[in-house]
Amino acid sequence: MKSILILLACISFTLLAGTAHSQSLEQLLAPEIGTLDSAKGPAVLQPLANSFERIALAHPKSWHANYYAAYTYTLLAFAAPKDQIDALGDRAQEYLDLAMAIRPNDTENHILAAYLLSARINANPMVRGASMGRESKTHLTAALEQEPDNPRALFVRGMGIYHTPAVFGGGKKKAKPFLDRALEAFDAIDSDAPLAPRWGRRETAQLLAEYK
C-alpha cells in the first residue's frame, strides 16, 4: 500500500511539474509578444530578439518561441541597412526552420517565410525581386489555400503587390483589395489567445493610409 501511495505521489508531482513548465513558458512569452505590438527600431527589437532566442534555446520544442525569434529577426532585417539584411535574415531563417520542423503544416510558417523573403528582396530588389517574389507568392498561395481569410497572408500579399512596379503587374491599385480584406479580417478576429500571432494590422493600416 505504501509503495502504491509513493507511486501515485510521484505521478502527481510529474503532472504538476509539467503544468508549471507550460505555464512558465507562457508567462515568459506573453509579455514579450505584447511588446512586439508597438516595437519599432533596432534599439527595441534586438533585445526582444535576444529574449526570444534565450526562450527558444531553453524550450527547443516550443513552436511559439522559435516562431517569434524568427519574426523579430525578420523585423530587424526590414529595418537594417542593405549590407546587414542577409545576416539578420539568416538568423530569422534558422528559427523559422525550427518552427517549421515543429509544426510542418502551420499556415503562419508560410506567411512568415513570405514576409522574410520580402525583407531579403530589399537587399537587392533588381536582382532578387523576380525570383524571391515568386517564392514568396508560392508560400502565400499555400497559406491562403489553408486559410483564405488569414489577415497576415492577405497583408503580406497586398504589401508585395503594393511595392511591385505597375509595369510588372503591381501597384497601389491592385494591392488595395488585398489590404482592404486584410483590415476587415483583422477587425473580425475574436481571440484572446495570448501567444497567437497577431502582427500586421498596424502595417496594413499604414499602407492604406499611404494609398489615400
Image (cartoon, helix red, strand yellow):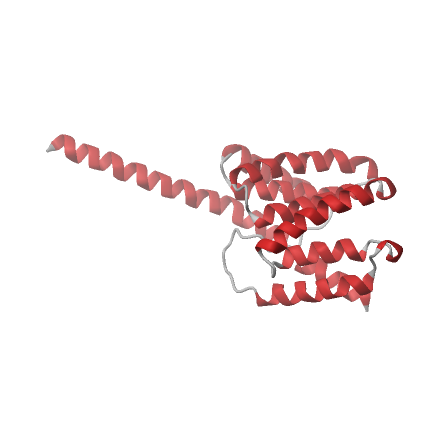
In the rendered image, the residue lying farthest to the top is: 3
Locate the C terminus by quadrant: bottom right
Measured as percent of width and height from the top left, residue 138 is found at 69, 47
Q: Mark yes or no: residue 42 visible.
A: no
In the rendered image, the residue lying farthest to the right is: 167
**Relative side of 139 to 106, left or right:** right
Q: Is residue 99 above or below residue 168?
A: above
Residue visible at 66% across and 52% down? 141
How many numbered marks are there? 0
The quadrant holding residue 86 is: top right
Please state which of residues 99 and 77 is positioned toward the viewer in this rendering: 99
Please state which of residues 55 and 90 is positioned toward the viewer in this rendering: 90
Q: Mark yes or no: residue 71 visible.
A: yes
In the rendered image, the residue lying farthest to the left is: 1
Q: Is residue 122 above or below residue 162?
A: above
**Relative side of 135 to 191, left or right:** right
Locate the N terminus by quadrant: top left
Residue visible at 60% across and 44% down? 68
Measured as percent of width and height from the top left, residue 176 is found at 76, 65
The quadrant holding residue 135 is: top right
Measured as percent of width and height from the top left, residue 4 is found at 15, 33
**Relative side of 13 to 86, left or right:** left
**Relative side of 107 to 203, left or right:** left
Q: Is residue 55 above or below residue 197?
A: above
Please state which of residues 63 and 47 is positioned toward the viewer in this rendering: 63
Residue visible at 20% across and 33% down? 7
Please state which of residues 147 and 172 is positioned toward the viewer in this rendering: 147
Measured as percent of width and height from the top left, residue 164 is found at 83, 53
Residue visible at 76% across and 53% down? 160
